[in-house]
Amino acid sequence: MNQLSAMRMFAKVAESLSFAIAAKELHVSTAMVTRGVATLETHLNLQLLNRTTRKVLLTDAGLEYWQGCKEVLAQLDALDASVCSATRESAGS
């Protein structure tokens, strides 16, 4: 799993505070989202989420990382849209 997809998974979990909701929105299994977030936490060597059987909460580091993820992912989405738009325009008449 690459870091970018793990960041997207983490951002969805942080937004919804639910692994199940994030998985549903991303069209993947809950186990895949859980693994992605765990991989990201291992990569960063810190805990981003506090998990209990009833709820998920962001740690202070998780909140800071989520803010950064939102910015990075928004910039990436804007870049994708810009390139796709320019490609469509140049492929026209």
Image: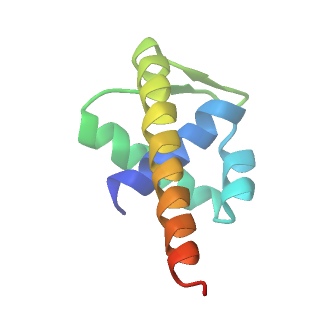
Q: Is residue 90 above or below residue 8?
A: below
65 vs 55, left or right, is left
27 vs 57, left or right, is right
Residue displayed at 42% across by 38% down:
72
> Which colour scheme appears in the figure?
rainbow
Q: Nearer the viewer, residue 77 or 16?
A: 77
Question: In this orientation, does residue 17 appear?
Answer: no
Which residue of the protein is positioned furthest toward the top in this rendering? 60
Number of marks in picture: 0
Which residue of the protein is positioned furthest toward the front in this rendering? 93
Q: Is residue 87 above or below residue 48?
A: below
Which quadrant does the N terminus fall into? Answer: bottom left
Residue displayed at 57% across by 65% down:
85
Q: Is residue 2 above or below residue 69?
A: below
Question: In this orientation, does residue 83 appear?
Answer: yes
Q: Position of residue 93 (x, y in %)?
A: 60, 87
52 vs 49, left or right, is right
Q: Position of residue 13 (x, y in %)?
A: 61, 39
Q: Quadrant of residue 15?
A: top right
28 vs 6, left or right, is right
Residue displayed at 64% across by 64% down:
29
Q: Quadrant of residue 5?
A: bottom left
